[in-house]
Image (cartoon, helix red, strand yellow):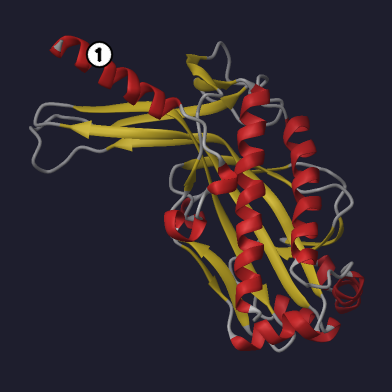
Amino acid sequence: MKKLLILLMLSMATIGLNAQTDWSKVDFVKKYKMNAKIGGAISKSFKSEPTFINDYNISQASLMKGESRAGVMQKQGVGSVFAEAALAGVSAAAIQKLIEELHAEFVKDLTAIGLTISDGQSVLDYGNESGKADKNNTWIGRTDGTVIFDKKGLLDNAGDVKEVNIFRPTDMPIYTSSAQFVGNFYTKAASKANVNLLSITYQVRFASFDGSKNMNRNSLTTEAGLSILPVVTIMNPKGAWGGVTFDKKIEGNNNWSTGLKETDSRDGSYWGLSSKGKYSIHADEAKYIEELRQMVLYTQKAIAAEIKAKMK
């Protein structure tokens, strides 16, 4: 009887681990510590001035790294352990299609809470007339569907992410900069065009690294670990800054993974873009895209709901 009870408990635990999250029922404020930092000035501007979504993108990690560093209490000669993994099996075309759908849904969500969404033309006109469109690290105009590949350096504060591919909807008006110090880049645009600026980036990770150590050795385990961290910034025409923050990464279900495998080349051909790695976590594309879609879809609905709550 005792043996049967243990087996039953293990079976129930397995079912719990494999249960699919119903993202429509998740309390993002409670579970992921979502906080809308929107003061009275921005709240009033949302009601009186139009809002331009000046950037909307998915920053999909395509190569990640983990480490278990040697500690001072370990025996002499114990070395650090490092690991890299690329994402395999998910095409650029699938993510591009997804972001088109998610952007359209976000516009609907913001319109539904009472925001007037601007086409951003006045902001683009300002950017072109001021000469800012000719500066390095700026994107001013309409997107053409090009995926931007980027390698993360020490100053990017990316931690476990080494390479990303950035996706934006095709033919979307955009006014953004990747410069470390932007100065009055956004402030003047919002003021001159008399609009609120709202941008959102979804930082998407696909792997997790679990390091452990004892006196004699370090070890490191690489597993599937789909997560998103939204970065939402807001500025009103008078230069007031706001945003929506998350103290915890939003972690998804990982039944899309078919396992960690050693690749037979380092040319990144399995990804179809520019990332590469000796090992890769292979994905069932349909499952990966659907889980990511659900995560982002309901996250941005929660973001819209929090903005609406601050507008009362």
**Residue 41 appears at what percent x and percent y?**
65, 88
User: Which residue is located at x 48 percent, y 27 percent?
Assistant: 85
| Quadrant in which residue 136 is drawn | bottom right
Above or below for 9 versus 234:
above
**Residue 64 in the figure: left or right of residue 46:** left
Q: Going 80% across and 65% down the picture, which residue do you hit?
A: 111
- Residue at the image position 54 percent from the left and 14 percent from the top: 263
Whether residue 80 is visible here, answered yes or no, is: no
- Answer above or below: position of 206 versus 188: above
Count the labels in the image. Answer: 1
Q: Residue at x 14, y 13 (%)?
A: 2
When asked about the image quadrant of residue 3, the answer is: top left
Mark 1 surroundings: few (<14), some (14-19) or many (≥20) residues within 10 A: few
Mark 1: amino acid: Leu
Residue 87: image location, x then y, percent: 57, 27
Q: Nearer the viewer, residue 132 or 245?
A: 245
In percent of width and height, residue 84 lies at 45, 29
Q: Is residue 85 left or right of residue 38?
A: left
In the rendering, at what x and y percent does residue 265 appear? Answer: 58, 14
Q: Quadrant of residue 12?
A: top left
* Residue marked by disc 1: 7
Q: Nearer the viewer, residue 118 or 186?
A: 118
Judging from the image, what secondary structure is the residue with disc 1 in? helix
Q: Nearer the viewer, residue 91 or 268?
A: 91
Q: Is residue 87 visible?
A: yes
Figure quadrant of the N terminus: top left
Question: Quarter holding the C terminus?
Answer: bottom right
